[in-house]
Amino acid sequence: MFELLSANTVTAMLPELTYSLPYFGTVDFRMAVASIVVFIVLTFFFWLLRIVILQRAKMLANKTAGTFDDVVVDAVQNVRAWVYTIVALYASLQFFTLPDLLDKIVMGVFLFSVVWQIIEIITQFVDYFVTRFLEKDEDGDGMVDPNSAMASNMVTLISRITLWSLGVLFVLSNLGIEVTSLIAGLGIGGIAIAFALQGVLGDLFASFSLYFDKPFRIGDFIVVGTDKGTVEKIGVKTTRIRTLQGEELVVSNTEITSARVQNFKKMRERRVSTQFGVTYETPQDKLREIPGIVTRIFESLNGVRLDRVHFTSFGDFALIFEVVYFVDTSDYKEFLDIQQQFNFDLMERFAELGIEFAYPTQTIYTKSA
């Protein structure tokens, strides 16, 4: 890696530094001096890079409108000082022939430090792109959508696992360890683990499907099969729903992606169909007034639009009227408030006109023999 700093190249530029020492005999100090010079030069260069060059680059980056150049400068600036020291020390030690064990240790420390720092830099770029393209404020409330935050965290986690796996294999390979059999073993083991954890992996990919397809988000009121409630969390494996009864319902992501889901939060308006019945004894002229009564009641209500009102059928004990109207909100409580007000107003108007609501009755006719 440091062929340009070979002993012959650097020591050839130094004057003769051979001295005779007691017990050691004739010693050539050019190797030691060259090693120290290389260490000092590299340390000074790294210091110049951190203090002078990066500071000027940061000032220029702050003047630009984009943010990518800021990330590049920050990534280089976040390189640890001890990593620079290890690189300089490793380069200076290349002038000496070290014992095999010590040489392995020095190379291992150097490779691990460099690989770790490279992974940190790549992760910083991954975080930048994930934050920019995945973390979105879809509600316009100034806060990142929880679904987006969860997806970005999963992408970051998977990228870290992948980078560290490749980094460890790179370090082991450069230390002379045979990694081919290790990769083959990991591949076979990975297949076995995939079969054993196919349910977990299915839920993991289902969670990605939930994010990119967005059938619902945290805070939405949904119905899954016979269960319904408000979504509280979309996790890697499960989705947690707070039901109307108050308990927490945990549903696997695979089950949700394969089931029909009704999302009431995305409902722009609510269509309501309701019926009421009046007695058969109601005079015909008052029956004809009922559609107009219902229409005038809805005209006095806010946030509601009447679609139709009709005398639809003859029931067993009542004359059935059907009312269809639209509520301009998906909020269930507001819908109930409007329905309640309509019921109160209808009862009041019927009481004024002497119209009676029907209820189950049975008339028995008797005949004297």
Image (cartoon, helix red, strand yellow):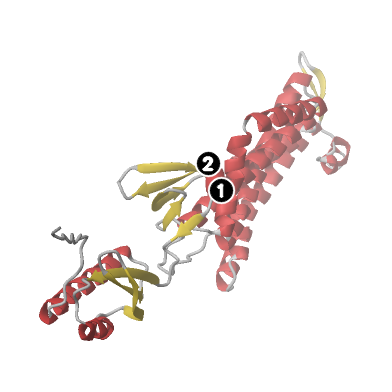
Question: Could you tell me the amino acid type at mark 2?
Answer: Lys
Q: Name the element at disc 1.
A: helix
Image x and y of residue 93, in percent: 75, 32
The C terminus is located in which quarter? bottom left
Neighbours of disc 1 within 10 Å: few (<14), some (14-19), many (20+): many
Q: Residue at x 76, y 15 (%)?
A: 22
Q: Is residue 283 left or right of residue 260?
A: left
Image x and y of residue 149, in percent: 50, 54
Image x and y of residue 56, in percent: 60, 64
Q: CA distance from mark 2 to mark 1?
A: 7 Å
Q: Residue at x 58, y 37 (%)?
A: 200
Q: Is residue 336 left or right of residue 95?
A: left
Q: Residue at x 58, y 66 (%)?
A: 67
Q: Is residue 180 left or right of residue 121?
A: right
Residue 163 in the image: above or below residue 62? above
Give residue 207's mark: 1
Q: Is any part of residue 78 visible from this angle?
A: no
Front-most of 275 and 369? 369
Q: Is any part of residue 136 visible from this angle?
A: yes
Neighbours of disc 2 within 10 Å: few (<14), some (14-19), many (20+): some
Q: Are marks 2 and 1 in contact (CB under 8 Å)?
A: yes
Image x and y of residue 121, in percent: 63, 49
Instruction: Determine which quarter of the picture holds residue 21.
Output: top right
Give residue 149's mark: none
Precedes in sequence: disc 2 or disc 1: 1
Front-most of 169 and 327? 327
Q: Name the element at disc 2.
A: loop
Mark 2, residue position: 237
Residue 352 in the image: above or below residue 56? below
